């Protein structure tokens, strides 16, 4: 599913573009075939990489983000250690917390939802081996 420009604010579009992997060219103006398209959030890396990159862009520490998530989620015990667990891929947040993360990092909920789902799918595929 492609996210249309009507679905996002200008700030969200810029944030989404900023967290995408850079494109490589062949040197002749063409794109290399092994580079994924920028509009595909599943190729933006893991959920943890996505929120880490955005947190850094906003100049937030893990503690700052944890404080914001406490306020937005209504969960007073959210700590920077939990942010670290999400960033390192040890945990994947629930939908309720995804909403708070999307709000705190000014990212589209659809992007976070898809990236988290891709991580869950990779984790599930790895456990079947």
Image (tube, rainbow, N blue to C red):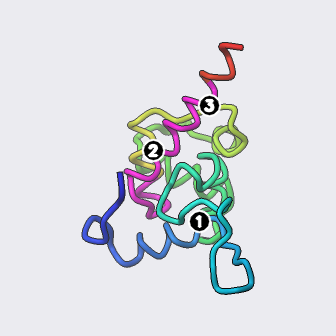
Q: Quadrant of residue 29?
A: bottom right
| N-term mark: 1 or 2 | 1
Q: Quadrant of residue 61?
A: bottom right
**53 horizontally vs 112: left or right:** right
Q: Main secondary structure of the magenta part?
A: helix
Please report contact status of discs 2 and 3: CB closer than 8 Å, yes or no: no
Seen at 41% across and 70% down, the residue is 12
**Does the magenta segment cover residue 104?**
yes
Seen at 41% across and 50% down, the residue is 72
Question: Nearest the camera: 41 or 67?
Answer: 41
Return the residue at label 2.
114
Residues under labels 3 and 1: Cα distance?
20 Å
- The x and y percentages for residue 48 are 64, 47
Seen at 47% across and 58% down, the residue is 104
Q: Residues within 10 Å of mark 2 (few under 14, many from 20)?
A: some
SS at circle 3: helix
SS at circle 1: loop
Residues under labels 2 and 3: Cα distance?
12 Å
Return the residue at label 3.
122
**Does the magenta segment cover residue 109?**
yes
Return the residue at label 1.
19
Q: Residues within 10 Å of mark 3 (few under 14, many from 20)?
A: few
- The x and y percentages for residue 11 are 41, 76
- Part of the protein shown in magenta: 102-123
């Amino acid at each position: 599913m492609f996210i249309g420009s009507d679905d996002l604010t200008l700030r969200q579009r810029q944030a989404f573009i900023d967290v995408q992997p850079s494109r490589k060219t062949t040197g002749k103006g063409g794109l290399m075939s092994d580079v994924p398209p920028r509009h595909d959030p599943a190729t933006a890396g893991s959920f943890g990489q996505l929120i880490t990159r955005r947190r850094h862009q906003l100049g937030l520490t893990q503690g700052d983000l944890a404080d914001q998530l406490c306020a937005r989620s209504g969960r007073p015990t959210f700590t920077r250690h939990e942010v670290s667990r999400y960033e390192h891929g040890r945990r994947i947040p629930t939908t309720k917390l995804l909403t708070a993360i999307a709000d705190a990092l000014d990212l589209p909920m659809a992007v976070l939802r898809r990236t988290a789902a891709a991580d869950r799918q990779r984790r599930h595929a790895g456990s079947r081996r």
